[in-house]
Image (spheres, rainbow, N blue to C red):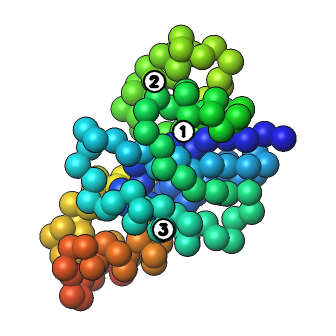
Amino acid sequence: MQKAIYPGSFDPLHNGHLDVIGRATRLCDSVVIAVAANASKNALLSSTERIEIIQQATADMPGVSVTAFDGLLVDFVIEQKADCIIRGLRAISDFEYEFQMTLMNRQLRSNIETIFLMPSQEHIYLSSRIIKEIAGTGNDVRNFIPKEAASILEKKLGLKQPKPTESG
């Protein structure tokens, strides 16, 4: 039985994340979405809100569970008795960072493998940072994130009726 850990801040979860989760469930029997409690990042959503969004958005995906973690990812992978780490790649800049992290993880725990997955072309440009920037200006991000994330994000930012985007 293959168990994978898909770590991230997911602030907020977007359709690219969901695409990678779906791909991971086709490769692994069990996928743990590990919501990082990263103090160095100023998260818009609390860990509890992010976990709630992910649980609701993945409710129909068998084998998916969600939990928070703090500390080193490799320690969490061992604690969870997982076989591998799932990471999403969108661009060359992602690869450079992820390559460095994978090499460091191998130095710490040589038996932990990392699997890189690319989201579908229609989601490859999405990032939580850009979504927060767009939403923060009052523009509609509902085409980019699951409805569970949209309602919490709209409340959090005090948005009444987001300005529609050209595609929405």
Dot 2 or dot 3: first in sequence order is 3
Mark 2 → mark 3, Cα distance in angstroms: 27 Å
Dot 1 or dot 3: first in sequence order is 3
- The residue lying at 54 percent from left, 39 percent from top is 87
Mark 2 → mark 1, Cα distance in angstroms: 10 Å
Residue on which the image places disc 3: 52
- The residue lying at 51 percent from left, 55 percent from top is 17
* Position in image of residue 38 (x %, y %): 34, 41
- The residue lying at 64 percent from left, 70 percent from top is 59
Please give left or right for residue 58 compared with residue 49 in the image: right
Give the amino acid type for the residue marked by disc 1 in the picture: Arg
Q: Which of labels 2 and 3 is toward the front?
A: 3
Give the amino acid type for the residue marked by disc 2 in the picture: Met
Q: Are marks 2 and 1 in contact (CB under 8 Å)?
A: yes
Which type of secondary structure does the marked residue at label 3 adopt? helix
Dot 2 or dot 1: first in sequence order is 1
Residue on which the image places disc 1: 87
- Which residue is most to the front? 79
Residue on which the image places disc 2: 101
- Which residue is most to the bottom? 161
Q: Is residue 91 above or below residue 17?
A: above
Q: Judge the density around disc 3: few (<14), some (14-19), many (≥20) Cα neighbours within 10 Å.
A: some
Q: Judge the density around disc 1: few (<14), some (14-19), many (≥20) Cα neighbours within 10 Å.
A: many
- In front: 84, or 17? 84
Q: Judge the density around disc 2: few (<14), some (14-19), many (≥20) Cα neighbours within 10 Å.
A: few
- Which residue is most to the left? 137
Mark 1 → mark 3, Cα distance in angstroms: 21 Å
Q: Is residue 111 visible?
A: yes
Q: Can residue 125 be seen in this view?
A: no
